[in-house]
Amino acid sequence: MTEHAKPLDMREKPSAPPRSDTPRPKKRDVDGWFVLDKPTGVTSTHAVSIIKRLFRAKKAGHAGTLDPLASGCLPIALGEATKTVPYVMDGRKAYRFTVTWGAETDTDDSEGRVIATSDQRPTRAEVETALPAFVGVISQTPPKFSAIRVAGERAYDLAREGEDVELKPREILIEELVVVAHDDATTTLDARTGKGAYVRAIARDLGRALGCGGHISALRRTRVGPFRESDLTPLPPRDSSDEALSDAQLAALLKPASAALSELPSVTVSRGDAGRLLRGQGVILRGRDAPITTDAVAVHADGALIAIGEIDGGELRPRRVFLQDRR
């Protein structure tokens, strides 16, 4: 104890932290999709928290993780739009990525530890010759540093703790994989994939197939489901009160929840049938134009999205119902 230190009286209660005079903004009901152009260096979770705080939204989620290294399309759902997240995640995805040759890393990207090197470098022709084996329905082993759960734990958490993570191969779809640029050390490719494909794994496996090793050094996602690069919005300014956006300006940045379902068949019902669906009841579809599909359909009434449903034997049954748009 220093000369002037006061002995601690365990009966004394610690002083409360000073109270701020500025009230914390109340969270509010806000619905829609903010299709973020995520910058590099930001995690998907942090990006969602920024947008959620910006809109003061009660509920938020995203449609597919992007690594901090990656930029581009990160659709963020607010409020009722979170009910449509699975339909966006199940959609097609598109990427532009650069593979650096001559080194394989434990994360399959440039942020990882180099675990193998080679002096060999492929020519453009050699890369293009190897690509057909990676197109179509293929077997792919996800990266050890991924969000896949292993015995209830995220694989990347186990890998960071030094555990030898063994992930099982799974079938994924690569619709397109083409070279758009090449030099002595790198190749840039465009890819269009289905659900569950890892671009980092493509780079890793291409490097192995070419006998030189490779890892992702740049990655940009340009599409997730119905959302494309033309839909992207950068992070709005938030540090300066002079640049703060009004609620009306923020609302203008949102796409409606229905935008996530633009690739689903659409069914329009009457106001009476809409009421039954919103109460969880099925309705019978009549007329020769009534769809017979049993897949998911987007249900509208009076021009508004009211439900996601399924059709069985001419009966439309609600899977999820939506509150009125509250933007």
Image (spheres, rainbow, N blue to C red):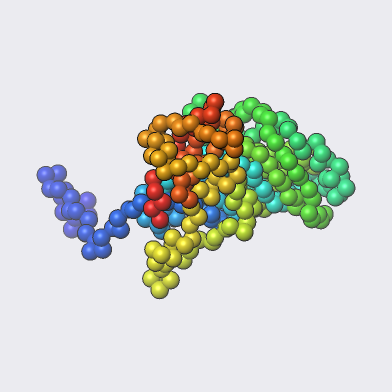
What residue occupies the far bottom of the structure in this picture? 242
Measuring from the top left, give residue 119's x and y in whole percent: 82, 46
- Above or below residue 299? Residue 303 is below
Q: Residue furthest front?
A: 287
Q: Nearer the viewer, residue 119 or 123?
A: 123
Please indicate whether residue 131 sits to the left or right of residue 275 in the image: right
Percent across and percent down for residue 322 are 42, 43
Estimate the x, y position of residue 79 in percent, counting from the top left: 41, 47
From the viewer's side, name the closer residue of 155 and 3.
155
Residue positioned 39% across, 63% down in the render: 247
Q: Residue 71, can we see it?
A: no
Camera-side residue: 67 or 92? 92
Q: Is residue 76 above or below residue 133?
A: below
Q: Residue furthest left?
A: 11
At x 75% / y 50%, what residue is drawn? 189
Quadrant holding the C terminus: bottom left
Query: How far across and down, in percent of the image, does residue 27 sit?
Result: 33, 53
Which residue appears at 51% of the width and 48% of the height? 258
The answer to whether residue 79 is left or right of residue 266 is left
Q: Is residue 199 something that shows in the picture?
A: yes
User: Residue at (56%, 35%) from the top-left corner?
Assistant: 287
Quick check: 240 left or right of 66? left
